[in-house]
Image (spheres, rainbow, N blue to C red):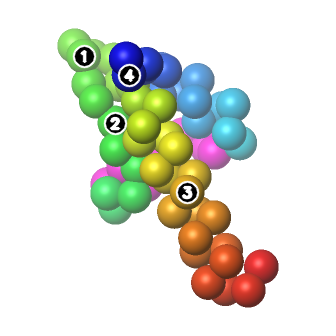
């Protein structure tokens, strides 16, 4: 079962500012879902974003 985390809560827990978070959504680097007025991120989407960051870091030789 996929779990949803409130978007702003996830951003805060991961040290990402709100403005940057919405920029990532606009750039399709981070996928969210809206339910009513609330925005959430799925565990799957969060993990995909983190995996992508790890891949980028490895490609840059970090």
Category of crowding for the residue at label 2, using alpha-carbon neighbours closer than 10 angstroms: few (below 14), some (14–19), many (at least 20): some
N-terminal of the two: label 3 or label 1? 1
> Quarter of the image holding residue 17?
top right
Category of crowding for the residue at label 3, using alpha-carbon neighbours closer than 10 angstroms: few (below 14), some (14–19), many (at least 20): few
Q: CA distance from mark 2 to mark 1?
A: 10 Å
Determine the residue positioned at 57% across, 30% down.
Answer: 10
Closer to us: 37 or 46: 46
**Label 3 residue SS:** helix
Q: Are marks 2 and 1 in contact (CB under 8 Å)?
A: no
- Residue 2, which numbered label? 4
Disc 1 designates what residue?
35
Category of crowding for the residue at label 4, using alpha-carbon neighbours closer than 10 angstroms: few (below 14), some (14–19), many (at least 20): few
Main SS type for the magenta part?
helix
Q: CA distance from mark 4 to mark 2?
A: 13 Å
In magenta, the rendered stretch is 16-26
Q: CA distance from mark 3 to mark 1?
A: 25 Å
């Amino acid at each position: 079962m996929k779990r949803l985390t409130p978007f702003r809560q996830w951003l805060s827990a991961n040290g990402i500012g709100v403005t940057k978070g919405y920029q990532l959504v606009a750039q399709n680097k981070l996928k969210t879902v809206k339910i009513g007025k609330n925005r959430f991120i799925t565990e799957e989407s969060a993990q995909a974003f983190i995996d992508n960051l790890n891949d980028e870091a490895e490609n840059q030789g970090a």
